[in-house]
Image: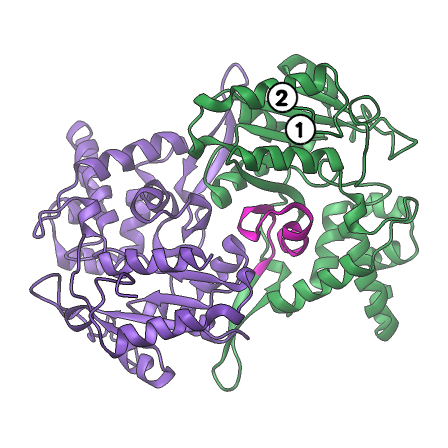
Chain colours: A green, B purple
Amino acid sequence: MTDRLPSWRPGQTRERLITYLDDLKSVPVADRVACFDNDGTLWTERPTYLQLDFFVDTLTRQAASDPTLRERPEFAALLSHDAAAMDDIGLERLLGSLASLLDGLTPEQFAALAVDFRNSYKHPTLGAGLEGLVFQPMLELLEELRALEFTVGVVTGGGTEFVRAISESLYGIPPELVVGTLIGYEFIRDDQGRPSLVRKSATHGKLNDKDAKVEHIQTQIGRRPILAAGNTAGDQAMLEYALAGPQPGLAILIEHDDADREFAYAGRAETTAENEPITDVADRLGWLKVSVANDWTRVFP
Amino acid sequence: MTDRLPSWRPGQTRERLITYLDDLKSVPVADRVACFDNDGTLWTERPTYLQLDFFVDTLTRQAASDPTLRERPEFAALLSHDAAAMDDIGLERLLGSLASLLDGLTPEQFAALAVDFRNSYKHPTLGAGLEGLVFQPMLELLEELRALEFTVGVVTGGGTEFVRAISESLYGIPPELVVGTLIGYEFIRDDQGRPSLVRKSATHGKLNDKDAKVEHIQTQIGRRPILAAGNTAGDQAMLEYALAGPQPGLAILIEHDDADREFAYAGRAETTAENEPITDVADRLGWLKVSVANDWTRVFP
């Protein structure tokens, strides 16, 4: 028993988690589906989303050979690290503009860029590469779930293709179980009639956040999760949905309260439009709150 | 060796298939992806698509309690089996109207209807239920591919949710590997704030046919197939895409030429707009043509 979830500190949180897992025998395997948010749930999301770093890397390289890119307000804000301008523009528009830099790439070309990034990235304060930014206790939970024959998906606000490029090697999660913000793809033929697919950011769908996370779990995975984990209001709908089905569910909220080992920003409302902080929602609905500081003996691998 | 593909008649077709499978050792497991069309490839599609029978069943039941449904031209044509009127209206509009009959259902409610249909359906001429309409040789091929650690998906023009409801039990293919024509889902809350998802046919995407099959393989599965099988021009793009990658690919075209055991309709162009019959495309591009009459010793389980 001591070998299970070794990076989870003995106590109420770990106990409730293990009790839940042990009680799953009555749940058919087909219903054993778990969905995990990515940023702030499976890996760190501070000081910036890792995908934003990937995109800004790409932008920096492209702007070196094409200075006109600096004339677009979104790119100017990003290249000059102008946080106020970025806030004004908004993350969704920033990401959309950044994604358009990669229009015309095939899935294989895009994946190669993402893998390059994975192999070269160093976190600005933690010093680690991507493999070192994943939460070790969550990897152990994924392992427990797989031992129980769970189907495990990542449900991320990030780009589906970016996360697919790293999900198998970081989490053991295959591309078909990554539910993210979709990019459009267009089927084209070259002069000789040979077919290929190319990225087309203008045709992408809804940002995969809040209610859309649940809608996309259905369209992409096709089954309701009984276990869901997240860390922000963007995950609320998904966590509630996991608890609303006929099977016993578990909703997990990761609270980032460890400035020494990671970052401390839990409990802060992300937007003023939020009328109920997510930790209050968690208490009201009986979610399992996980404190990075108190519940994890080890944060990173 | 004789235990492999037992319903495939010894000869050139079976030999080429087995040679291909045996030569896969150099292909990384992550690249071992196979995509199968459903109607006419994994199960029979004559005299009508089985999903159409499901929808017409639903329509017949609803029209019994709501006669105004008969006033809509699409439904009048379907209920009176008026083939000319159905042709005029077109399959896509017919299916869209039929899908709208199920608006507002949760995924679980829809799946229950589809499972009811699976358990009660009898084919009008073959007399079999759904399990008896699947092609036994294709089940054997799926088994071979799984033994080789392939990721196997169904890529169908049919409704994603309809095929998901039967794909695990008929083919051993889980919902996340079904790529079909998507229905929209909307996240809603009831009076008490409890969340659910409901079908909304008006928000569905592109019909999953021709080029769209390739685009949707990428958005849903996220990897290129190296083996693809189909039986119509709707599968051409997918089969070509499977052969266009860096790994050795195989494209399989099922030819329905067995009036005694199934149906004979191979080689007929489906529309006058088709400028090259699919069997000619197969010859030009070196696909493996499979004759139901000559290459299969047994058609159904």
Q: Which quadrant holds the N terminus of chain B?
A: bottom left
Q: Is residue A180 left or right of residue A98?
A: left
Q: Position of residue B141 (x, y in %)?
A: 32, 61
Q: CA distance from mark 1 to mark 2?
A: 9 Å
**The residue marked by circle 2 belongs to what chain?**
A
Q: Is residue A269 above or below residue A201?
A: above
Please report the bounds of the magenta region as a residue range: A160-184
Q: Is residue A166 above or below residue B32?
A: above
**The residue marked by circle 1 belongs to what chain?**
A
Q: Is residue B63 visible?
A: yes
Residue B56 lies in what quarter of the image?
top left
Q: Is residue A281 visible?
A: no
Q: Is residue A275 left or right of residue A226?
A: right
| Tag in front: 1 or 2 | 1
Pick whichever of labels 1 and 2 is earlier in the sequence: 1
Residue A36 lies in what quarter of the image?
top right
Q: Position of residue B229 (x, y in %)?
A: 35, 66
The residue indicated by pointer 2 is: A18
Residue positioned most to the front:
B1
What type is the residue that disc 2 sits on? Ile
Q: For label 2, count other residues whose C-alpha is less than 10 Å away and answer few (under 14), some (14-19) or many (20+).
A: some
What type is the residue that disc 1 sits on? Arg
User: Judging from the image, what secondary structure is the residue with disc 2 in?
Assistant: helix
The residue indicated by pointer 1 is: A4
In reply to whether residue A244 is colored magenta, the answer given is no
User: Judging from the image, what secondary structure is the residue with disc 1 in?
Assistant: loop
Q: Pointer 1 and pointer 2: residues touching (CB < 8 Å)?
A: yes
In reply to whether residue A170 is colored magenta, the answer given is yes
Q: Position of residue A7 (x, y in %)?
A: 76, 30
Residue B142 lies in what quarter of the image?
bottom left
Q: Main secondary structure of the magenta part?
A: helix
Residue under the point 27% across and 57% down: B39
